[in-house]
Amino acid sequence: MAIPPELRRLLAERDKNRCAYCLTTEENCGSRMHVDHIIPETAGGKTTLDNLCLACFSCNVHKSANQKGLDPLTKTTVPLFHPVQQNWRDHFTWDDSKTKIMGLTACGRATVLTLQMNHPTVTKARRRWVSAGWHPPAM
């Protein structure tokens, strides 16, 4: 479904032109953010501001229609991070190098794993962004 321009503008403003999952900015991506249905349309999710977020290509393609993921620590299936209803800092933090996202909760760990938020290609890009002073973004 096409996202109306006004809705996309509201999303960009709310999400600060960055991925709601990994916080990568649109400027660092070098491409326009995708609009993610947090609850997929196939599962009854609506095209409304409270069910949409911006997502970089990597997070969006790995999330796909997933709403749950495996927590690698507890080996239980848990809901993925909901960027509109939950606070990023409650579930994630950066490692000391600021290039890897660490899950603080079962939800955070499952989201990092499912969305492959520390894929080597992404981590390598973050390393360059950190050295340039472009990352991590201000919260």
Image (spheres, rainbow, N blue to C red):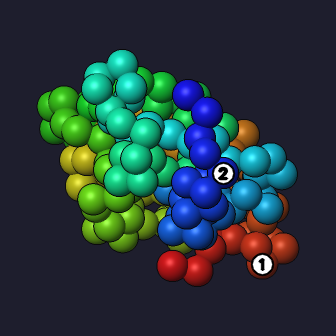
N-terminal of the pair, mark 1 or mark 2, is 2
Q: Amino acid at mark 2?
A: Pro
Task: Name the secondary structure under disc 2.
Answer: helix
Left or right, residue 23 beside residue 106: right
Q: Amino acid at mark 1?
A: Gly
Left or right, residue 137 beside residue 32: left
| Residue furthest out toward the top | 42
Residue 106 horizontal/vertical position (percent): 22, 47
Mark 2 neighbour class, 10 Å CA radius: few under 14, some 14 to 19, many 20 or more: few
Residue located beneath label 1 in the image:
133
| Rendered view: 116 above or below 138 | above
Left or right, residue 44 beside residue 8: left
Res 69 seen here: no
Residue located beneath label 2 in the image:
5
Give the label, 1 or 2, closer to the camera.
Answer: 2
Residue 121 horizontal/vertical position (percent): 72, 40
Q: Residue at x 19, y 36 (%)?
A: 78
Residue 2 horizontal/vertical position (percent): 61, 33
| Rendered view: 15 above or below 50 | below
| Rendered view: 69 above or below 30 | above
